[in-house]
Image: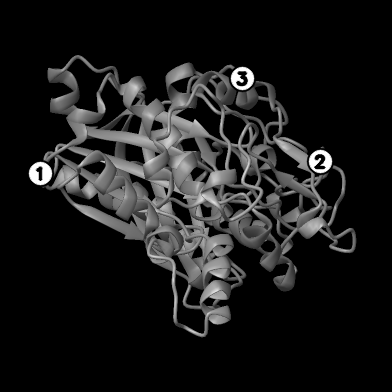
Amino acid sequence: MPVITGLGFITSIGNDRAAVLRSLRELRHGFEPVRFFDNPNIAVKVAGTVKGFEFPTPSWRDWRWPERFTVDRELVRGLAPHGVYAVCAVEQALSDAGLTAAELAGGGTGLFCASAGSPLLMGHFMQQMNEARGERGNPLGIVSSIAGTLNFNLAAHYKISGAVCGFVSACASSSHALGYAMDEIRLGRQQRMLVVGAEDMTAESIVPFAGMRALSTNPDPATASRPFDRKRDGFVGTGGAVALIVESAELARARGAKPYAELVGWGQAGDGHSVAISHPEGAGLREAMRRTLADAGVAPGAVNYVNAHATSTPAGDRSEALALQAVFTAAGARPRISSTKALTGHGLSLAGAMEAAFCALAIREGFIPGAAHLTEPDAACDGLDLPRTSLDEAPALVLNNSSGFGGSNVCHLLRRAV
């Protein structure tokens, strides 16, 4: 059975476990006013900023991060901004799991990552090449900017020679990474997996979604992200990185590690509906939840808490609410439900790993995050249990939902470790 033994966080609600835990318990959001491209005419005014990190230009020489994190300057040359976040998150996860970087080296550990690459760097390098009419190109331009940049750099840096792969399924990407990491361990192919999700927190990564009318234009940081609320008007973008150390229960036990949670099931299903819009009745997510429960051999009534994917978009949240009704309400089950994106914003490829880590924290620490910023629930949520405050309840079984463009839906089920 795979277990989570280490977590590392660089997020809008905190850059370490203690800060993230406090934010989740107290429902402290990580949003701040922003001025993308220094343009007051852009309607998007709020983002989930990552505090203490600065990437003012595409040049790594201008980048800054908190002094408590050690990131080798030679390594940084091949990284995107989200790669810097990722290294800081991995170092935390290693320490949390009681491991050293040297213990990742070799074939005993695998690495599954997820990111969308770096639009900031890709645009910069393409502009340079165009200006040179193709006669010059940055030698590190590809490895620092395309979607595989995380697994390229982290595998080389930590000398990981087990299974290494990058996943690209939009906002379900790091959930796919975690699910397939579970399978590597369940099938006996690997004893340990490092799973990392990360995204840039830059205008180039967030503002393009405004063209799809997917972003909130609410200028108030306290109400811009409000999943399941009648007045929601789009998601708030964020970036950062989260790293999870996943090991076989046998390995964790042998080295005396204390697991956060067991990963007991996962499932996935497609909508077969649209490149960008959720199925109106949540068909794919409904099936993914059912497959996850079946994989774990668990009935809907056994689930205590669902961390919803809900991003605060009108169509997406309604779709998920209907899927939840079909899986749980129809079975007479009433788990607590909330979306922590009300606090963090939507981390895109990062979201699934980040929220799985939040679920692991909730299980270990014995609480359920509340549905922040929810004042008027959508009619589609009638009958769903959406607590307005965090609860001092110790969930034994937690379901984590993720959905991405193209109709990718992925769910994980986590259980209190014994």
Percent coordinates x, y for residue 140 in the rendering: 39, 61
Using the numbered discs, state the Cα–Cα distance from disc 1 to disc 2 in whole angstroms.
46 Å
User: In the picture shown, does residue 281 fall above or below 33?
Assistant: below
The crowding category of the residue bearing disc 3, from other C-alpha atoms within 10 Å (few below 14, some 14 to 19, many at least 20), is few
For disc 1, the marked residue is 188
Q: Quadrant of residue 205?
A: bottom right
Residue at point 25%, 23% (across, down): 99
Nearer-N-terminus badge (1/3):
3
Q: Is residue 156 visible?
A: yes
Q: Would residue 297 be seen by someone viewing this image from the given angle?
A: no
Q: Are marks 3 and 2 in contact (CB under 8 Å)?
A: no
Q: Element type at marker 2?
A: loop
C-alpha distance separating marks 3 and 2: 19 Å
Q: Which mark is residue 22?
A: 3
User: Would you name the residue on which mark 2 appears?
Assistant: 221
* Of the two numbered discs 1 and 2 in the rendering, the one whose residue sits closer to the viewer: 2
Q: Residue 145: horizontal and vertical position, in percent?
A: 46, 62
Image quadrant holding the N terminus, namely top left
Q: Nearer the viewer, residue 18 or 124?
A: 124
Mark 3, secondary structure of its residue: helix
Query: Which three-letter amino acid code belongs to the residue tagged 1?
Result: Gly
Task: Say which residue appears at 78% left-offset and 39% top-offset.
Answer: 32
Q: Which mark is residue 109?
A: none
Indicate how the structure is coloured in the image. Answer: one colour
Q: Position of residue 220 (x, y in %)?
A: 87, 43
In this rendering, position of residue 31 left or right of residue 86: right
Residues under numbered marks 1 and 3 in contact, where contact means CB atoms less than 8 Å apart: no
Say which amino acid is labelled 3.
Answer: Arg
Residue 114 in which image quadrant: bottom left
